[in-house]
Amino acid sequence: MSDNTTHATPIIIRTLRESNCAECALNPVCLPPAVEDSHLDQLDNIIERNRPLQRGNHLYHERQPFEAVYAVRSGAIKAYTTLPGGEEQVTGFYLPGEIVGLDSISSGHHASSAVALETTAVCTIPFGDLENLSREIPGLQHHFFRLMSKEIQSDQQLMVLLSKRTAEERIASLLLSLSARHKRRRLSEASFRLPMSRSDIGNYLGLAVETVSRIFTRFQQMGVLEVVGKEITILNRGQLCQLAEPASEMPRASGT
């Protein structure tokens, strides 16, 4: 993969107060509920809002020392590891309001690399400062425990996807996951844009890119989706749920 940067450390620019946590549209997604204004001010004081990363630039690299977690403000991030043969293995996609880097807390080094899929802005949260602040803000530590738990659940659900499901089930489940994640941001759960390429989707789900394209075409022919480039519209959610969980009346729409 091409990368225009030789160092992964983002350029820090302290922004004006109008882009603070209290007024951020993603506040309900990435922060615990019912945080007092005074506590939001404390959180603002440790957060660094960075110059946007351009597509293909890295937020951090695998095995780089772990110093911070990152909240995606806009755009999208792809996490991946490098296999012994040099191949890339996609391990996750992160959308606005989601936290990147939680998988590195235990080791002290980043377990994966994180690269911008498009122009992407993040908030950098130094982990040492976050630990100290968690002792003062009720619910903050518990909130990050919940986020780490979701990360573990996502890893487990991906293993199920790769080991037990057909190609159609994998892609349908991914689309439902993305739909649910857009809904949490109070955006349309029926119409959204895929920031990742068909190749990235195939890598993540263990499918050939030709298989991914063929299934998207099949879903369109079935009247389940409308696909225009990277723009997706779910036309028949019930049928998409059945494709994701053919043996279940109530499909699970998990995060990735």
Image (tube, helix red, strand yellow):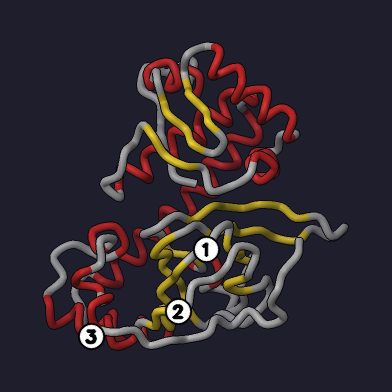
Residue drawn at x 38%, y 22% is: 237
Q: Nearer the viewer, mark 1 or mark 2?
A: 1
Q: Residue 163: where, in percent of width, then height?
A: 66, 33
Looking at the rendered structure, the kind of residue marked 2 is: Asn
Quick check: 216 left or right of 85?
Answer: left
The image position of residue 171, as x and y in percent, is: 57, 30
Q: Secondary structure at mark 3?
A: helix
The mark total stands at 3
Answer above or below: position of 244 versus 104: above
| Residue 135 appears in the rendering | no
Report the amino acid beneath label 3. Gln
Circle 1: residue type: Thr
Q: Label 2 near label 1: C-beta < 8 Å?
A: no
Classify residue 129 by image quadrant.
bottom left
Mark 2 residue crowding within 10 angstroms, few (<14) / some (14–19) / many (20+): some
Q: Residue furthest front?
A: 228
Residue 42 is marked as 3
- On the image, the x and y values in percent for residue 195 come to 53, 48
Q: Residues within 10 Å of mark 1 (few under 14, many from 20)?
A: some
- Secondary structure at numbered mark 2: loop
**SS of the residue under disc 1:** loop
Q: Residue at x 71, y 34 (%)?
A: 207
Mark number for residue 119?
1
Question: Which residue was labeled with disc 2?
Answer: 50
